[in-house]
Structures are given as C-alpha cells and as structure tokens.
Image (tube, rainbow, N blue to C red):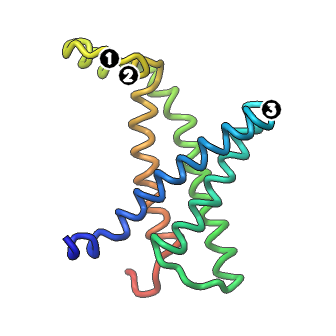
Amino acid sequence: MKEFLKKYKEVITYIIFGVLTTLVSWGSYAVFVNLLSMKVFTGNLLSWICAVAFAYITNKLWVFDSKSWNAGVVVKEIISFIASRGVTGVIEIVCVPLLAKTGFDNIFYNILEKMNISIGILFTDGIYSKIVLAVIVVILNYFFSKFLIFKKKNDK
C-alpha cells in the first residue's frame, strides 16, 4: 500500500485537492450570493477566483511540489495557471450546451430509463454533458499543470 501511495501521490493529491477546490467554489458561491446578496454573475465570478487561487496554491505546494518562490517563477506559474483554467472554463461553457443540444444526454436518459432508474437530479437538462465535460476538464487541467505550469526541469 505504501508503494502504491508513493507511486500515485501526485494523482491522489490532485484528486483530493480537486474535491476541496470544488467545495471552496461552491461554499464561496453560497456565501457571496446568499450571505452577501450578490448577483449570480458576480458571486460566480468571485467564487471562480477563490477556487482558482486555492487550486494554484495547493497544486503548487502539495501536488506538483513547485518550491520556488522566485517572483519570476511565481508570476509565470500564476499567469499560466489562470490562462489554462480560463481555456478549460471556456471549453466547458461552450461544450456543455453544445452537447446537450445535440442530444448527447438522451443516450444516458434512455439507458437509465431501461434500467428503471429514476433519480431526479440526473434528469436535469445537460447534466450528463456537464458530467462528461467535468471529467475532460479535470484531465486537461491536470495535464496543463503537470506538463506546462509546474513542469520540473528534469521532466522531458
């Protein structure tokens, strides 16, 4: 087990901090919209900023072990991190409705219907497209972080 954890530490910590990043996003969104009475757009934007900041710090320190605090390195990492998250954010924003419009979700609705499974939230328009795109975005974010943003000098 120790060997497994050592071998997959990066992926395991990425998943753990990804879940925590999601909680930061949802929690801060709830605070901004419900407690501070912000409009949805503003609350969503600020919660995205909080989540990206949290993800950058946790990815830098604990996932990819980027130890340099040299201003040039940090600025390059931050700009690259925000840009990559912006790209994957746009991919999700564009592709979820596109997939939903093309009937992608109907495949899953039909499968669940044939299995006599009826779970209300799973029948929200576009939910399967959103789930599939979330998986793709997580994978893309991991590769951007590993091979572009926090790339170690000895990585090829």
Residues at marks 2 and 1, CA–CA distance in whole angstroms: 6 Å
Q: Secondary structure at mark 2?
A: helix
Q: Secondary structure at mark 1?
A: helix
Instruction: State if disc 1 and disc 2 touch (CB < 8 Å).
Output: yes
Question: Is tag 3's residue or tag 1's residue first in the polypeptide sequence?
Answer: 3
* Place of residue 39 in the rendered image (x, y in percent of width and height, measured from the top left): 78, 31
Residues at marks 3 and 1, CA–CA distance in whole angstroms: 36 Å
- Above or below residue 27? Residue 149 is below
Residue type at mark 3 is Ser
Q: Nearer the viewer, residue 98 or 92?
A: 92
Instruction: State if disc 1 and disc 3 touch (CB < 8 Å).
Output: no
Q: Is the N terminus in the top left, top right, bottom left or bottom right quadrant?
A: bottom left
Q: Secondary structure at mark 3?
A: loop
* Place of residue 3 in the rendered image (x, y in percent of width and height, measured from the top left): 21, 76
Q: Nearer the viewer, residue 140 or 34?
A: 34
| Image point (20%, 13%), residue name | 114
Q: Is the C terminus in the top left, top right, bottom left or bottom right quadrant?
A: bottom left
- Above or below residue 38? Residue 19 is below
Q: Which residue is mark 3?
A: 37
**Mark number, residue 93:** none
Left or right, 85 with reference to 28: left
Q: Residues within 10 Å of mark 1 (few under 14, many from 20)?
A: some
* Place of residue 148 in the rendered image (x, y in percent of width and height, measured from the top left): 50, 70
| Image point (73%, 32%), residue name | 34
**Mark number, residue 105:** 2
Residue type at mark 1 is Tyr
Residue type at mark 2 is Asp
**Mark number, residue 109:** 1
